[in-house]
Image (cartoon, rainbow, N blue to C red):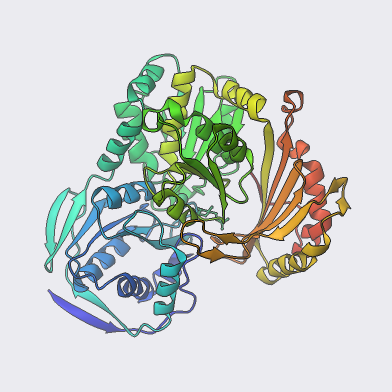
């Protein structure tokens, strides 16, 4: 086995976005594209001499091939060991758990999360730091800079490694350690939740449906929910990971998990439904006839976390991304703990978690998690919900009604305009940005603007700053709208419009969210002229 040094030239645009480098699978499959990025990571965090890395992905098309390439490159760059999930699989939260449990020098995760996979879909890769979380911008910036100047990469000339069996193999002096992708993660879950209580719940008449969307959580959910907690077999559906996710869009929201939604709103709906995304870090929670928004889920979990053994001593604080509704802030206030609003992107929670300032974090984009790892964690959220339902002996609908009666309801919806013209979307944002100073005091569609700004953030722990993180238009305590461009799309631009309205009166808490938000929706349209400027009559997705 010899180390080959291959001459290469930089590719434009190898810039990690909200969550790593994402591109069309065909772009990643070009000669040297993946290799350039991986070498740039190694050059930035290395030299790898003596290091141990964690490696795994969500099983999408090109996953296996990319894993083999990365193993050979890690060996050629002098790594001592790579811990890799069997069949190249590791969910994102499980990868974070492995990095932390095995104390590896970070890891590489192959995924484009909730974006469709397959040859015509998307692929992605990101580097996570030794704490287990996504690399902060100081590191991703350095990786990007390195991709722009790279001239060569190193790779071992060797046969592919068999990743179907657990155990250790030598690869040019580097140990390749194949592990069960579920074991370390399942052990962590056992330490946090009252598995006996959840087992008793499943032993009663309680029924659940978990849609793994043919993505990576299938093996995790089957092992934990069915095999360990005794949920009847068939509780987990679409549980076999497929390279193209069965042609589906593995994003757990009411639009892409339509079949689950239909079942949960049918006459013989199960008590509890949930879904997770491509790489297992997102979640959707739905009760019988009751959809729980991610923002509400965060608030409910923060308010009830103490019911799970792992959080019995209470939580240190709650963090949400800025566009997430303000529901969690009210819970934090009542608990007397700190509340933080960060820019979109899980990586911004890392410093707060490391410093022990927060225990629970969440985002409107269907991510919830805690200090147990440094990623959001779909199955964790599902298990915490199960623990809460088991402890409270209540239905999801009753939990929500009780929560809103106590804290008020934040009606919430996100409208997405996908794959729109990038220049038009940027112009829309720029024009709105320049008009912000004049907005306070204006009344639009019956709502008076009290504050308008472009969200800027200073990390309270390390002082790092981020600007232009989303335009906020606040209508007092009553309502709020946020507009920002997605950082995870791969085609054109996606405009996200986040809408919310607070309703403290239980008598007014039973409306359809789109109806309850109609005034805010109209106000944003008047202020931003979305439909005209983007040439769209409707959003593509309403969460
Ligand atoms: C990824 C990140 C999340 C983020 C989400 C939305 O899932 O891990 O932290 O909230 O993307 O990003 P976007 O930029 O598309 O709104
Ligand atoms: Zn994901």
Choose between 22 and 146: the one closer to the eye.
Answer: 146
Q: Is residue 333 above or below residue 130?
A: above
**Rendering quarter of residue 395:** top right
Choose between 301 and 164: the one closer to the eye.
Answer: 301
Image spot of residue 78 (x, y percent) = 18, 71
Q: As drawn, which residue projects farthest toward the front?
A: 336
Choose between 116 and 176: the one closer to the eye.
Answer: 176
Going 84% across and 48% down the picture, which residue do you hit?
448
Q: Is residue 212 above or below residue 60?
A: above
**Lateral position of residue 324 relative to residue 367, left or right:** right
Going 79% across and 64% down the picture, which residue do you hit?
437
Q: Is residue 117 above or below residue 503?
A: below
Q: As drawn, which residue projects farthest toward the top?
A: 204
Q: Is residue 52 above or below residue 156?
A: above
> Which of the image's four quarters has the N terminus?
bottom left
Choose between 263 and 305: the one closer to the eye.
Answer: 305
**Lateral position of residue 519 relative to residue 20, left or right:** right
Image spot of residue 501 (x, y percent) = 73, 40
Going 58% across and 46% down the picture, which residue do you hit?
364
Whether residue 394 can be seen here:
yes
């Amino acid at each position: 086995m010899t180390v080959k040094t291959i001459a290469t030239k930089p590719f434009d645009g190898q810039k990690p976005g909200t969550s790593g480098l994402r591109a069309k699978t065909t772009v990643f499959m070009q000669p040297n594209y993946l290799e350039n990025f991986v070498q740039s990571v190694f050059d930035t965090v290395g030299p790898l001499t003596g290091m141990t890395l964690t490696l795994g992905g969500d099983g999408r098309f090109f996953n296996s091939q990319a894993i083999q390439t990365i193993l050979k490159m890690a060996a050629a760059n002098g790594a001592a060991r790579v811990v890799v999930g069997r069949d190249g699989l590791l969910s994102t939260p499980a990868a974070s758990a492995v990095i932390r449990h095995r104390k590896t020098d970070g890891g590489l995760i192959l995924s484009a999360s909730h974006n469709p996979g397959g040859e015509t879909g998307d692929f992605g890769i990101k580097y996570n730091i030794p704490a287990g979380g996504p690399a902060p911008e100081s590191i991703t910036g350095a990786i990007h800079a390195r991709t722009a100047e790279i001239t060569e990469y190193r790779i071992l000339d060797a046969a592919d490694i068999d990743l179907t069996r657990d155990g250790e193999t030598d690869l040019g002096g580097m140990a390749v350690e194949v592990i069960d992708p579920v074991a370390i993660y399942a052990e962590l879950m056992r330490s946090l939740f009252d598995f006996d209580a959840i087992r008793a719940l499943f032993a009663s008449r309680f029924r659940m449906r978990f849609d793994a969307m043919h993505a990576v959580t299938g093996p995790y959910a089957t092992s934990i929910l069915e095999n360990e907690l005794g949920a009847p077999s068939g509780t987990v559906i679409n549980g076999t990971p497929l390279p193209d996710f069965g042609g589906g869009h593995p994003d757990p929201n009411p639009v892409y998990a339509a079949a689950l939604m239909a079942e949960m709103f049918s006459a013989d709906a199960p008590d509890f439904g949930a879904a997770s995304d491509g790489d297992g870090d997102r979640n959707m929670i739905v009760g019988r006839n009751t959809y729980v928004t991610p923002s509400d889920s965060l608030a409910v979990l923060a308010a009830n976390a103490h019911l799970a053994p792992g959080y019995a001593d209470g939580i240190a604080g709650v963090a949400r991304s800025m566009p997430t509704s303000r529901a969690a802030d009210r819970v934090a206030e009542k608990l007397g703990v700190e509340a933080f609003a960060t820019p979109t992107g899980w990586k911004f929670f890392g410093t707060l978690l490391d410093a022990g300032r927060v225990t629970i974090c969440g985002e409107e984009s269907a991510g919830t998690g805690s200090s147990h790892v440094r990623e959001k964690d779909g199955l964790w959220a599902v298990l915490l919900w199960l623990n809460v339902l088991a402890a409270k002996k209540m239905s999801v609908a009753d939990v929500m009604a009780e929560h809103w009666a106590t804290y008020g309801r934040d009606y919430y919806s996100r409208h997405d305009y996908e794959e729109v013209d990038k220049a038009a979307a940027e112009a829309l944002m720029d024009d709105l940005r320049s008009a912000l100073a004049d907005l306070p005091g204006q009344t639009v569609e019956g709502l008076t603007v009290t504050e308008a700004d472009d969200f800027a953030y200073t990390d309270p722990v390390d002082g790092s700053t981020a600007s232009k993180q989303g335009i906020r238009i606040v209508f007092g305590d009553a309502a709020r709208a946020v507009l920002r461009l997605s950082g995870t799309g791969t085609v054109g631009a996606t405009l996200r419009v986040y809408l919310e309205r607070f309703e403290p009166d239980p008598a007014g808490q039973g409306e359809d969210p789109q109806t309850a938000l109609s005034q805010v929706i109209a106000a944003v349209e008047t202020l931003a002229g979305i439909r005209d400027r983007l040439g769209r009559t409707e959003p593509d997705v309403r969460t």
